[in-house]
Image (tube, rainbow, N blue to C red):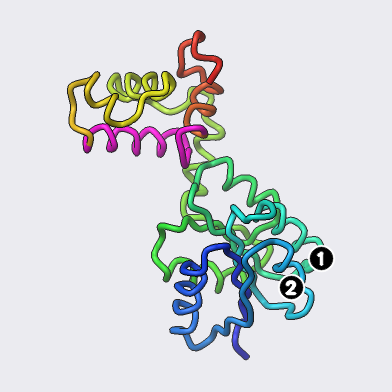
Amino acid sequence: MPITILIVDDHELIRQGLRRAFERVDDFEVVGEAANAADAARQLSLLTPNVVVFDVRLPDGSGIEAAQKARVNFPDMGIVILTMYAGDQQLFDALEAGASAFVPKNAPAEDVVAAARHAASSPHAFTATDLAEAMKRKLSPSGPKLSPREREVLQLLADGLGVAQISRQLYISESTTKTHISKLYEKLGAGNRAQALMSALRLGLLKQSEDQY
């Protein structure tokens, strides 16, 4: 029997891409698609798939909350969380919601298929590529080690500057600035500027005068 899949994402192109990825594998069958949480809940009741793939951001709510409800209503269903912003907080939110797997959208399609296969066989065992590192960041009392340049970039991000402005102020290329920002996000376990600044504030990496951020 194939592993049945319900794909929940508000972007049709994403749903089509995921459908094609699953249809290339013999042991999967996509039985439905939904563009929002309400339709997902309806289809889950009608189809009871083996695995549901939720995007985190849905037009009518959070995919994390939808996953939490699905776990309550369908205790043995596999649940995969797919997100554009794979920061630590979303990873731990997915874990607490009872998800089986957490995958960033920029991961190869094969990773999503592997996560779905894991979710089908072990729905109550959580897996994520960055789980071990995220746990280290969460448990580390000293926080991440930032280079002097990364601290400068972090402070300028907190001041509201964009990539081009930071590049001009530090006399570096925009490509170099983007590299520093990417490394900052990685070290802070953030998926975007807001998450990075909140994490930095929590860890005491920003000046006290920037607390409004």
Q: Nearer the viewer, residue 30 or 161?
A: 161
* Type of secondary structure dominating the magenta stretch: helix
What is the magenta range? Answer: 175-194
25 over 158 or under it: above or below: below
Q: Is residue 132 magenta?
A: no
Residue at 45%, 79% in the rendered image: 20
79 over 65 or under it: above or below: below
Dot 2: element: helix
Q: Which residue is mark 2?
A: 44
| Quadrant (top left, top right, bottom left, bottom right) of the N terminus | bottom right
Q: CA distance from mark 2 to mark 1?
A: 9 Å
25 over 135 or under it: above or below: below
Q: Nearer the viewer, residue 79 or 8?
A: 8
Q: Is residue 177 left or right of residue 3?
A: left
Callout 2 amino acid = Leu
Q: Nearer the viewer, residue 78 or 53?
A: 53
Residue farthest top in this picture: 209
- Rendered image: mark on residue 56: none
| Residue 107 drawn at (x, y percent) | 41, 60
Which label's residue is closer to the chain start, 2 or 1?
2
Callout 1 amino acid = Asn
Crowdedness near tag 1: few (<14), some (14–19) or many (≥20) residues, C-alpha within 10 Å = few
Residue at 24%, 19% in the rendered image: 169
Crowdedness near tag 2: few (<14), some (14–19) or many (≥20) residues, C-alpha within 10 Å = many
Mark 2 or 1: in front is 2
Answer yes or no: do the residues labelled 2 and 1 have beta carbons within 8 Å? yes
| Residue 46 drawn at (x, y percent) | 77, 79
| Residue 103 drawn at (x, y percent) | 50, 58
183 over 68 or under it: above or below: above
Q: Is residue 71 left or right of residue 185?
A: right
| Residue 211 drawn at (x, y percent) | 54, 15
Q: Which residue is mark 1?
A: 73
